[in-house]
Image (spheres, grey):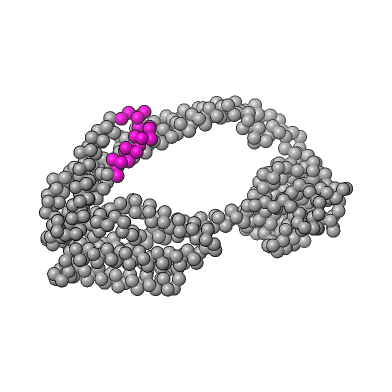
Amino acid sequence: MSHHAVTAAGTAAKTARLLARLLLVVVLSLFPLLAAPPAARADAPVEVVVEDTAGALYLPQLEPALAGISFYQPTKVVVFTRAGRFSDDLNEEVLRFARAEHPEWISADGQKWADGLFVFALDTTGRQIGTYFGEDRKVPLSEQEAIQEDTKDLFRSAQWTDGTIAGVKSAASRIGRPWYLHPGTLWTGGIAALATLAGFGIRAGVRAGNRSKFAEALDAGDRSYASVTLRLEETELNASTIPPASTYGALVLERWHTLSARLLEMTKLRERLEAMGPKERSVKASVEQAREFQLVTADLDDLDDAIADSNALLNLHSMWREAWRNQSGDLAKELAEMDGMLAGSKTEGSPETAAALRSHAATALQRIAALEAGLDNGTATPDAALDGLKAEREKTAELMEKHADAVIAAHTRSDREAELMRDKINEAAEGQRQQRRYGGSIVDIAYPRLPFISVTSFSNGVDAGQDAVSSARSAASSSGSSTGYGSSGGSFSGSGSSSRF
């Protein structure tokens, strides 16, 4: 580890120790609240009623488990299961069942759930959970949603009995809970100390993070800077012999002149960065300067390689074959990996786009080999060979884009899902591009906007996109609590809600 990184790590460790001491102070300030004696809790529900019309529950496990759950207030527990349809309104169906089979679950005026009652409802095929409360046992909607959330992982795995037990336990921890045991009260009790800690912690954390980022950027920039300065004389000599009449030679030289003019500026910037103390390195503006140093020197370092290859290839010097393979190797590697990518279940796309990519990859490898042969026998000029590489890149990117559309269409159900997956594919490609930068590529330096090809980043993007789509679907299926009782509910306004899993 470099001196810069060690220094940043040591400072971060000191900050962490200080935050730990402050956290101890906060915990001690909250101790009186945490140590307050809980309210007396009933030994068990006053009654447990199970109406398992879906036939989904294992009663020898369920009944003793429910009987052993303690509530803060005496509560009658009802468990009702059904096997309905996805389109059913569970709230309405629970009320309909109660009116027909258990009118004692409803208040005397028929408008609310009976006092002292908690109803846990499960629709195994309609994929819904409901929680309903007598007026003296009701909890806020946010707490109802929390009870329902505590069951959904189990219910998604069809663990109906375990999920039901988890739901009743969750409800028992909330119904009639004393005010001083509410999480919000604990936060309120320690608000001053927590605010102080949070303010200090955020500032200290940001500053420590900035110092770490500064050290990383400076270290990376130093490595590139050392490489550039060590080979500077050789690079200038190579640049002086690049034929300016070559389209690629002229563009590489233009880039060299632009960047090399900044080398002196980077030398001065490096001196300023090295001289900065911990306080200055903690500032965002200093981190940005360190990153500028890192990026400019990295571009210069990549340009060294491109200039050496340009000199050898454009003049067809003795090392031209190695230079050509430096330029064509990355694309050839991606084309060779295309078959494996297309064989994957997640990235196979449509038969048409896969066939087009597979055919192109095979013939493009042949054309790249033919370009090298043309350089060897004099039938192709260096500029023409580089133009050929550029054309293969563009065609591959075009076919990859069409294939991406097919993959997205195969794994999404809506425009929003398609947008999510496309964003992840683009993010993966851009991340790989930023990591690679120019990589000594003459074609990339000459045409910076040329599409980037990476089978690995495409596969990673598809994986990330599918994860994002799955998360979005899960969130959509489990969110949006329903609180009404449908058209047959009339004026019934008992406390309760349902949601999907």
141, above or below 191, in the image: below
Quadrant showing the N terminus: top left
165, above or below 364, in the image: above
Residue 23: x %, y % from top left: 53, 29
Quadrant showing the C terminus: bottom right
The structure residue drawn at horizontal position 78% and vertical position 39%, both measured from the top left corner, is: 73
Instruction: State yes or no: residue 36 in magenta.
Output: no
Residue 223: x %, y % from top left: 25, 42
Q: Is residue 276 visible?
A: yes
The structure residue drawn at horizontal position 45% and vertical position 34%, both measured from the top left corner, is: 205
378, above or below 492, in the image: below
Residue 48: x %, y % from top left: 80, 50
Residue 249 is drawn in which quadrant?
Answer: bottom left
Q: Which residue lies furthest to the right in this view?
A: 108
Q: Nearer the viewer, residue 415 or 144?
A: 415
In the figure, is residue 387 to the left or right of 314? Answer: right
The structure residue drawn at horizontal position 70% and vertical position 64%, both measured from the top left corner, is: 85
In the figure, is residue 348 to the left or right of 187? Answer: left
In the figure, is residue 227 to the left or right of 12? Answer: left
The structure residue drawn at horizontal position 60% and vertical position 28%, both measured from the top left corner, is: 190
- The number of numbered discs placed on residues in the rendered structure image is 0
Residue 220 is drawn in which quadrant?
Answer: top left
In the figure, is residue 191 to the left or right of 63? Answer: left
Q: Is the magenta stretch mostly helix, strand or loop?
A: helix
Query: What range is drawn magenta here?
Result: 276-295
Q: Is residue 441 visible?
A: no
Residue 350 is drawn in which quadrant?
Answer: bottom left
Q: Which of 215 and 255 is in front in this view?
A: 255
Residue 381: x %, y % from top left: 16, 66
